[in-house]
Image (cartoon, rainbow, N blue to C red):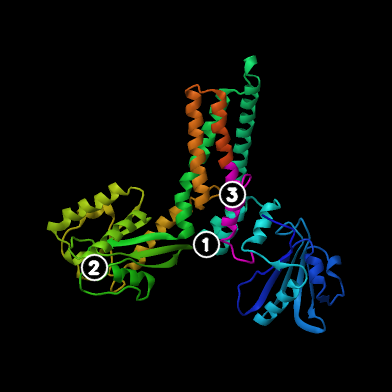
Amino acid sequence: MVDNDNIIALASPSGVGAISLIRISGPESIEIVDNFFRGVEKLSLKDQQSSKVQLGYIYDKKNTIDKVLVTVFRNPKSYTGEDLVEISCHGSLFIQQSIIQLLLSKNCRIANAGEFTMRSFLNGKMDLSQAESVADLISSNSEASHRLAMNQMRGGFKNDINDLRSELVNFASLIELELDFSQEDVEFANMNELISLLDRISLSLKTLIDSFKTGNVIKNGIPVVIAGEPNSGKSTLLNSLLNEERAIVSPIPGTTRDTVEDQINLNGVICRFIDTAGIRSTKDEIESIGIERTFKKIKEAEIIIYLIDYSQLNSSNMDYYINYLNGINDEFPEKKLILVLNKEDEKSNVEIDSLSKFKPISISAKNKINISALKEEIITHINSLTSQIDNSTISNSRHYDLLNKTYEEIHKVKSAINDKVSADLLAIDIKQSIYYLGELTGEISNDEILGNIFSKFCIGK
């Protein structure tokens, strides 16, 4: 997957800016830049100390291209584990391209997407789970998603996984040893110790698997569905929460026929607010499709805001709403349900004590009355989610899939022990568990998987 080519790329965003950063890595990277650099200290880059910065000029023959800062990082103490040079130049497109084209003339090529990080992984600077977190860190758009990515980049669950894998490898070796001495009727692997290990692994895996729900919604934004009957004020509420006219508001029932989505940052977490079609019986084919999508979004949501039109609430429809809300809680007990009574300024005189178990919040979306109380309720739930973030919180779908596969294999091993299955078959299931754990951290990998992972990175990383 990696060669001894010298690679170069623009590491800062493309386009005009105050400063741009050009990165070159490879065995000849220092020598290549030295061909075109003249330091004010008259110090050659090959004699410059690692991690030190030198001011100077980049020359194309006799022409000065730019005044730059050049930093040298010597292997193995660099991001890639190879000799690496970073050039900070002015952000002109002409300057960027002139320097890159100049260096390309001396035995180097443009880096592939994610190739700097791939070299870091292949040179043992980080494991695969840490390398993947680099992309998450770059794309993090909130305090919580940043903290999640930083935890993973610092090692996350890597050490725990490696320890568990090492113990499994040890037991697999002992079982293989027993097979070699099968004629001697000798037991090397203590089955009670193996069962104890499997129980510990199962518990660790289950903790990691369960954390994905939290990690995934924080990484991608917490989905908050605004649901309710037509004309209850869902679109008006979305506009009030976003503080802009995002959704069309009309007194005509059924105006919203598809989901409308936008996001805001609440307390350091991105929330994706989704306005949905009003829930009612209808013969309109297009509106029916919109209502189907409403139920789909409710299933995918972390928080459900259910709106009731306070002006239309009365003793005859109270039981209907109570039964409906109980149904949501019964079907989605893991979701946060927030009952909102909208149009408080037009409210009826009906008693709402029977709704107290749902802790309703009375608002006027149109006049933006008590919107802050609704936001505080959402933030309270967000805080309960972010408090669960630690080094064991996973947010990567590939990790989640491999952890589930490992969990299943571990249970196969436990069942095989209980069923007194032969040692050779037991060894197969243990090896499969070891394989999945190895894939997780990159101890075991193939070119196709690595190519797919790093292709999602930007060129300069």
> In percent of the image, x 50 and y 21: which residue is there?
420
Q: Position of residue 416 (x, y in %)?
A: 49, 26
> In percent of the image, x 47 and y 54: which residue is there?
216
Residue pointed to by mark 2 = 344
The quadrant of the picture occupied by the N terminus is bottom right
> In percent of the image, x 65 and y 58: which residue is there?
117
Q: Is residue 455 magenta?
A: yes
Q: Secondary structure at mark 2?
A: helix
Which of the two labelled residues, at mark 2 and mark 3, occupies the earlier sequence position? Answer: 3
The three-letter amino acid code for the residue at tag 2 is Glu
The residue nearer to you, when weighing 328 against 297, is: 297
The three-letter amino acid code for the residue at tag 1 is Glu
Residue pointed to by mark 3 = 156
Q: Is residue 438 magenta?
A: yes
Task: Tell me, yes or no, if residue 157 can be seen here.
Answer: no
Instruction: Looking at this view, name the residue that lies furthest to the bottom.
Output: 63
The residue nearer to you, when weighing 283 against 110, is: 110
**Residue 262 relative to residue 104: left or right:** left
Residue pointed to by mark 1 = 143
Disc 1 packing (10 Å; few <14; some 14–19; many ≥20): some
Give the Cα separation between the discs numbered 2 and 3: 47 Å
Q: Measured along the vertical axis of the image, is residue 366 above or below residue 215?
A: below
Q: Position of residue 387 (x, y in %)?
A: 48, 52
- The label nearer to you, 2 versus 3, is 3
Task: Tell me, yes or no, if residue 168 can be seen here.
Answer: yes
Give the Cα separation between the discs numbered 3 and 1: 17 Å
